[in-house]
Amino acid sequence: MARDAFVFSTIDDRDLWVRSGGRCAKCKRTLIFDDIDKKVNIGEKAHIIGKGTGKKAPRREFGEEFGINEENIDSIENLMLLCSPCHHTIDTNVKNYPPVMLFDMKEKHESWVDERLKQEKKAIAVLHKRKNSMPFDSILLNEEIDTLFLDAVSFQEEFIDFSKAGWEEAKKHNEEFFKRIVKAKKEFSGTKLFIFTLSPIPLLIHFGQLISDTVPVVVYQYDRKIQKWALENSSEKAEEQKINVNISKDVHDSLVVTVQVSGMIAEKEVREVIESPYQHLDIRIEKPGIDAVIYNHDIKIIKEAFRKYVYDLQDLHHYKDIHLFYYGPAGLAVELGRTINKSMLPEVHIYEHNRRGEKKYTRAITI
């Protein structure tokens, strides 16, 4: 796979990228990805039957056998798209990568891409992970979700500064990250955003608010029991969660909203941080618990209950501010954030559950 000048049109170049789905034919990694403030391209057009003579033309001696000559050596039929490391590996280890293997690799990879394109499962992977230092791998996600990620936009930097300044800085990072997502969405029109998250809840609610409910997205939730990302239950559909909604009678300038899904939020924990009078809207599933809500049908029910009661109460009483206390899964946090419209609601203060402090909750982010 020599790297001499190509006799290759712009149309053929784009055709090769489309056939390959923007992925390496050998390792399947995305060839264009986000780095700091710009896209990075590690993709290379690689000859199967090498161009040139001698050591600079790996597998050139097999040209006649496979019908490759000087006239068609730069054709799409003799080219495959690889990442730089795989290109180097195949060129260096020629004996272990004969032409028949590479032509087969190219055909199988392009068929794999074609099948996913026919299924219309095309998406941009959005990876928001600010808990722990182990990153999500978009290649493994691509295989697990069985879709074709045309791009992956990733923000995976551990959040450790829980001070007021730290939260404000994190909001700016969310806004910068969202701009990168918008840019990717413009480049790949007609694609959905597939969102994978594992970050502090206030950041995810704010992130969801940036995305809004007007953009087509699919938010995946991690199922710890099977250690996979889940959207719908793969077995028989589970019985839908029952939602209990309670609204206190006394009306005040502030509304406190508690959402109890993964565990309980005690009234005294709210009063530790909200000293002024408030009206209380409590939304909870019948039996809160870790992993009680994983699948999309339950998340939709809770999301719609949140939207309905918050907006109905705001229309009735015109609160000066809303205080949101949430105890639930990451995916639902994003979905709740998507319902928050700044033009229709007052300031929304979001609280972080603090396991180590004297107070169980502290104010983190204001939308």
Image (cartoon, rainbow, N blue to C red):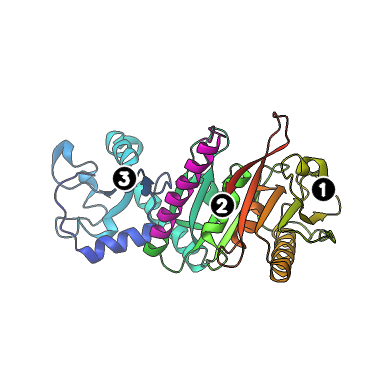
Q: Which image quadrant: the C terminus?
A: bottom right
Question: Does 281 appear above or below 46?
Answer: below
What percent of the width, then of the height, locates residue 31? 36, 49
Identified by mark 1, the residue type is: Pro
What percent of the width, then of the height, locates residue 159? 53, 36
Identified by mark 2, the residue type is: His
Circle 1 sits in a helix, a strand or a loop, which is it?
Answer: loop
Q: State the residue position of label 2.
A: 206
The quarter holding residue 56 reads: top left
Region of the chain picked out in magenta, as a range: 158-184
Q: Residues within 10 Å of mark 3 (few under 14, many from 20)?
A: some
Q: State the residue position of label 1.
A: 288
What percent of the width, then of the height, locates residue 204? 58, 49
Q: State the residue position of label 3.
A: 42
Q: Nearer the viewer, mark 1 or mark 3?
A: 1
Circle 3 sits in a helix, a strand or a loop, which is it?
Answer: loop
Q: Is residue 328 visible?
A: no
Question: Does 26 appear above or below 247?
Answer: above
Q: Are marks 2 and 3 in contact (CB under 8 Å)?
A: no
Q: Nearer the viewer, mark 2 or mark 1?
A: 2
Q: Residues within 10 Å of mark 1 (few under 14, many from 20)?
A: some
Q: CA distance from mark 1 to mark 3?
A: 46 Å
**Residue 166 counted in the magenta span:** yes
